[in-house]
Amino acid sequence: MHAAYSAIFEPGFFASPQVHVAAAIGGLVAIVSAITGVFTVMRGQSFGGHALGDVSAAGGAGALLAGLSPVAGFVGLGIAGAGVMDLIGVRRLRGRDLATGIVLGTAIGLSALFLRLTTTSGATTGATQHVLFGSIFTVPAGTVPVVGALGAVAVAAIAVVYRPLLLATVSPDVAAARGIPVRLVGLAYMAALAVSVGLSSLAIGAILSTALLIGPAAVALRLTRRTGHAVGLACLVGVAVTWLGILLAYDSFYWGTSRQALPVSFFIVALVFASYLASGVPAVRRMVR
Amino acid sequence: MTTDELTMSATAPILDVDQVSVALAGRQILDQVSFSVAAGEFTGLIGPNGAGKTTLLRVILGLQRPGSGRVTVLGRHGSLRRQPVGYVPQKVLLDPDMPMRARDLVALGADGDRYGLRLPSRQRNEAVREMLHAVDADRFADARVGTLSGGEQQRVLIAQALISRPRLLLLDEPLANLDLRASQEIVSLLARIASEQQIAVLLSAHEMNPLLPVLDRVVYLAAGRAASGPVDDVITTETLTALYGHPVEVLRVHGRVLVVAGDQPATTGTD
């Protein structure tokens, strides 16, 4: 019994302060991503969500270069990117692709510039790795309340516009005819999306933030018939894969003899992929229904 | 033009469209369109594709500002208007994987414009159940809307539009993607609702034949201009020739109406 326990939880897992911070940030980020992600998938804006990840990467890299807080960089530029996408025309279906493509390209270019300047000017090694692929074990404990507060704002925004957003997703014309300010509601959602992607860039990296945004939501959409249930299930899946990913990454230090931990982001993304595959299995579907 | 005056009743019409003109990108879409609709009336908005039917519906809904003229719904017009108008659009985004049951979509018709999360309400659930029953959609109330057939989705969308108890129901090409049988079912459902609940129904279609048994009146749109009145007054060779601005002929074959221009049918009636 004890042997099995220590095989699952390698020594010091529950005592490690880094694990505590990682679990707190990972859990918060997973919940915020799952909630916004359900709407992202329903609105068919996964590509837009990914582009915002690239924008946050540029923000994170810029913040490193300027010596600012990475959270401010990731989230701040993400919101600006969401605004630009709305201006270019993210509301129209064709305009949406265009807006996303233009913003995404520009953002990656800026990231390349900022990261090169950072790695050549300062002593910060691994900046590229941190910004693009995350560094959840190195986040300072003081970041947790900031992540919690920003996440709460994003979730509150979604809660306020919940019904109008759903109606506008199904039919913008019906929503507009009912007097709903469709563009404003869409903008509130885009801002929540930007915050959510910014936060998850901090945790699992800008490039991989899409996985935590889309994966759990896509799993939930396959398994439930109701929007509210999909939101709840996406949160559960998101938190489960994130915490399990943290555990596996911690344990991986003790695997083999190399004494080198594998990246958390890899485990989280692998688990997201596995759960998406599992959600397609009929037996799993019946179990949840 | 047989723009008949509001002589049918002493009460004001539910909908009054007065001299409405719309130009989009320099092109005249609607040219001085006038007609009115009374309670309990079933009106067909008929015309070929591109005649301006959708634009006219958008003007009535307040989604498109007319260049000139005005629309009055229940005696009110302009931005003061906050009258419930039920609307069934031509296109809705209902993917099969959308996590939304038929009953959830109908509930959105009741409170989709409210902010904040929805609290449980027995009264709302009951209203949704009643509405699904009224459109004969009880069987698939708990199915995902995206997995329903075109006709079933149309019923759910009608229930969604009706749950806010509008006096006026607008439908944009609701029969466009339905087979003959589903079309007939939707048409008789709408006719029943119009007379039972005294709702004015304005339905756009490019093909008028499935509607002929139930139409009280017709608004015929061609080249942005409209003629309105009882079917037999409007769908005539003289009226439609004046409307199209070139010779067309109205043929009645086995109870069906065909509008032909030269050798080419102007509206499809040959299916």
Image (spheres, coloured by chain):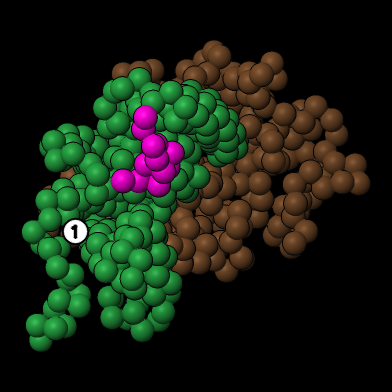
Chain colours: A green, B brown
Q: Residue at x 51, y 58 (%)?
A: B187
Which residue reaches farthest bottom? Answer: A1
- Magenta stretch: give its range: A123-135
Give the labeled residue for mark 1: B125
Q: Secondary structure at mark 1?
A: helix
For residue A11, above or below residue A70: below
Q: Residue at x 49, y 19 (%)?
A: B65
Q: Nearer the viewer, residue A11 or B221?
A: A11
Q: Amino acid at mark 1?
A: Asn
Q: Nearer the viewer, residue A250 or B82?
A: A250
Which image quadrant: the C terminus of chain A?
A: bottom left
Q: Residue at x 72, y 29 (%)?
A: B223
Which residue reaches farthest front? Answer: A257
Q: What percent of the width, then of the height, locates residue B208?
A: 64, 50
Residue B59 in view, yes or no: no
Q: What percent of the width, then of the height, locates residue A112?
A: 52, 31
Would you say A170 lies left or right of B236 here? left
Query: Dot 1, how many residues are within 10 Å of its Cα: few (below 14), some (14-19), or many (20+)?
Result: some
Q: Does the magenta segment cover residue A134?
A: yes
Q: Does the magenta segment cover residue B261?
A: no
Q: Which image quarter: residue A223?
A: bottom left
Which residue reaches farthest top? Answer: B68
Circle 1 chain: B
For residue B75, above or below residue A132: above
Residue A213 in view, yes or no: yes
Q: Nearer the viewer, residue A140 or B232?
A: A140
Would you say A286 lies left or right of B271 here? left
Q: Residue at x 54, y 66 (%)?
A: B182
